[in-house]
Image (cartoon, rainbow, N blue to C red):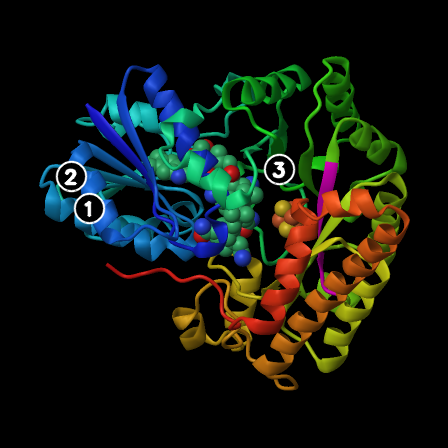
Amino acid sequence: MKVMLAYPNFIVTVASTPPLGIVLLGTILQKHGVDVDLIAATADKDWNWVREKIELSKPDILGISILTPIAEAGFEMAKMAKEMLTNVFVVMGGPHATILPLETIGNEHVDAVCLGEGEETLIELVNNLNNLEGVKGIYYKKDGEIKMNSPRPPIEDLDSIPFPNWFLLPTLEDCFKSAGTRRLPMLLSRGCPFNCSFCQPTLRTMLGKKMRFRSIENVVDEIEYLIDSYNIKECRFEDDTFTINKNWVIGICDEIRERGIRIPWIANARADTVTEEMLVWMKKAGCSDIEFGVESGSEYIRNSVLGKGLSTESIKQAFELCHKVGIETGAFIMLGNPGETKETLQQSIKLIREIKPHRISVYRTTPRPGTYLWDKTIEDGILNVEAYNRCEWYDFEELIIKLEDITVEDIRKTREALQMEVYMMNLTKYLAFSFRHPLTALRKLTKPSVLMTLIGMAKTRFLPKSGGTIKSP
Ligand code: B12
Ligand code: SF4
């Protein structure tokens, strides 16, 4: 039995983050003696490359992992495989397939859909391909009819999941090159108890209501494994809210120090879950950077529209604490939200000026199917469906949400202003530092954060405004 697992991502901007999902699934299949090939398309790959890989692998089962922005590419790949190999069984999984399972299984080239976590489901499916009746957590087709099996409960013991075998990913070195460092992602917990309208109930549908944590031992064992096996220089904790459980976070930091591990790592956090004590522990254990969802400078947009439940005060405090402790910060900002006005855009610029992040990621608000924001914007008649269908996920070409007071040009200008604000702040800091320490400053020029600042400034000034593209076959 040969299985191919694919992540059909042709989006330029995300090529540097290797897909943990298919690597974990591949690892489990391999441990059960299944012959498995992985492909993860990146921006420089095209459909001929995908065709060659399918031709070479000739899988009996093709598993495709899809997020909404890459779902179309996933369906194209299913079609291509069915045309090339008449007997191939196509199963789809990932967030998009889980949120829209009926639409996914409704595609003529798809034979089954995995809902939610795939670690237990996929191996059962592979072992019972001719009798899928008892396999929990899937929809599948039998004699042209769609069968919906009972749901599979989330995995209780996350420590039971093996560490990912990243060697399965042929494009791993490309990802390192694209990231500019040997960095790998890790997931230490699953789920999030908050209720942001642009994100939920997607996460709950995928991962269940209860938050689950890996044991401290198991987490730190994986960090050591990644250093020993892949010579990684940096680690990224992809948890949605790493800082939610104070004692657990401090426990991990303590263990990292106890074992003498010295590697920088990055985490995502909610501003109202960090404390000074926790940040000091994180800094000592190697945390170099924390990314916060700031979303908007307007309290009304952040809380009443986006459901974040996060005060401006706690955001200011979290950034102040990070600056004090010496952890670099990143801020995520969403522009073009329902109710956005020139005034709320100004509030976002003002807040960024006050909290002084080291990095900023600005997104145009694009509701995703299955979220509260998607339902609400449809109900209110303000989702620009044509623009949504045309849009590339990272572009700033059109407003996805119809707004009365502002145009897409206002949004673009605000994005530029926000980016410039952050680049200038960092440049000023860097120049002040170079006066005091000219030699160290010269050496720092090769540091990714300084280089990113310079490249970012140049891009904001001189490059076209749109983001990545998905190429058609
Ligand atoms: C890390 C991350 C990223 C990273 C890396 C993504 C990657 N390469 O995997 C980066 C930063 C690049 C990223 C980018 C984006 N992301 Co993101 N991201 C995440 C995050 C936080 C963790 C993903 C992860 O690694 N999970 C761990 C692995 C083990 O889980 P997994 O990939 O889901 O796979 C499991 C199951 O889904 C299933 N499965 C998956 N594939 C398959 C295939 C088969 C055949 C089977 C049987 C099972 C199966 O089994 C796996 C094991 O349990 C999730 C939130 C979350 N907690 O899941 C959001 C999330 C996946 N991202 C999301 C979005 C929307 C985006 C962006 C569009 C951001 C934006 N601008 O809005 C981009 C688009 C990227 C793209 N390629 O299209 C949404 C997806 C929603 C949707 N409808 O698709 C999520 C769910 C966040 C959210 N709450 O809304 N993201
Ligand atoms: S805090 Fe983050 S992960 Fe949790 S619901 Fe809000 S956006 Fe989603």
- Inspect the image, locate mark 2, and give the three-letter code of the amino acid beneath it: Glu
Q: Could you tell me which secondary element the residue under label 2 belongs to?
A: helix
Q: Name the residue under label 1.
A: 51
Q: Does the residue labelled 1 lie within 8 Å of ligand 1?
A: no
Instruction: Using the rendered image of the protein, determine whether residue 365 is visible from the camera's viewpoint.
Output: yes
Q: Of 131 and 265, which appears nearest the observer?
A: 265
Which picture quadrant has residue 309? bottom right
Residue under numbered circle 3:
239
Pointers 2 and 1 in contact (C-beta within 8 Å): yes
As measured in the structure, the alpha-carbon distance from the residue carrying label 2 to the one carrying label 3 is 36 Å
Q: What element carries label 3?
A: loop
Task: Farthest residue to the left: give it.
Answer: 86
Whether 211 is among the magenta residues is no
Q: Is residue 8 left or right of residue 407?
A: left
Three-letter code for the amino acid on which mark 1 is drawn: Arg
Residue 289 position in % (x across, y down): 72, 42
Q: In this view, does 355 lie above or below 151?
A: below
Q: Which of marks 3 and 1 is nearer the N terminus?
A: 1
Residue shown at 57% from the left, 73% from the top: 462
Q: Give the range drawn in magenta.
A: 288-296
Q: Name the front one of labels 2 and 3.
A: 2
- Residue under circle 2? 55
Q: Is residue 247 left or right of residue 264?
A: right
Q: In percent of the image, x 34 and y 29: which residue is there?
A: 122
Indicate yes or no: mark 3 CB to ligand 1 under 8 Å: yes
Q: Residue at x 41, y 42 (%)?
A: 94
Q: Are marks 3 and 1 in contact (CB under 8 Å)?
A: no
